[in-house]
Image: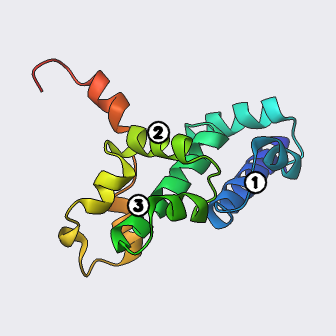
Amino acid sequence: MTADVEELRRLRRARSRMDREYAEPLDVPALAAGAFMSTAHFSRRFRDAYGETPYAYLMTRRIERAQALLRAGDMSVTDVCVAVGCTSLGSFSSRFTELVGMTPTEYRAADHSDLAGVWSCHAMVVTRPVRAVLEKRAAPAGT
């Protein structure tokens, strides 16, 4: 097996770990060590393979789960923040707003009836955060 294939396998394992353990206190150095790479090399190769940094991927995963919890409506924003593994409410709210285009409180209060009866795996695809602020800046004038 070539070194590149083995490296991609280790990157895939790290990404799977982020998918499973998103609420745990994961950090890039620990993920890199688990993939037997330096932090810088791991970050570069992860970005090459998946189009975003490991930290951005992990935060997107956490925000996806936060959206589901907020749609359920039975947890406070602070409780959701902690439940998805974030330690700073301010950073969580900022990242949530950047990715979703509204604050967590606005998202929780929004009408999500269009997702009623939709399987959670399908809802996750439909509601996947896509860096709303960046898309607005990149939109051509007049759209």
Q: Which amino acid type is shown beneath numbered disc 3?
A: Gln
Name the one closer to the observer, 82 or 121.
82
Which residue is under mark 1? 9
Q: Which amino acid type is shown beneath numbered disc 2?
A: Ser
Instruction: Tell me: 92 left or right of 141.
Output: right
Query: In the rendered structure, which disc, 1 or 3, sits on the residue that comes first in sequence?
Result: 1
Which residue is under mark 3? 67
Quadrant into which the C terminus falls: top left
Q: Nearer the viewer, mark 1 or mark 3?
A: 3
Residue 95 drawn above or below residue 114 = above
Mark-to-mark CA distance, 1 and 3: 29 Å
Tell me if label 1 and label 2 are in contact, CB under 8 Å: no
Which residue is under mark 2? 94
Name the one closer to the observer, 118 or 103.
103
- Crowding near the residue tagged with mark 2, few <14, some 14–19, many ≥20 C-alpha atoms within 10 Å: some
Q: Residue placed at 41% from the left, 37% from the top?
A: 98
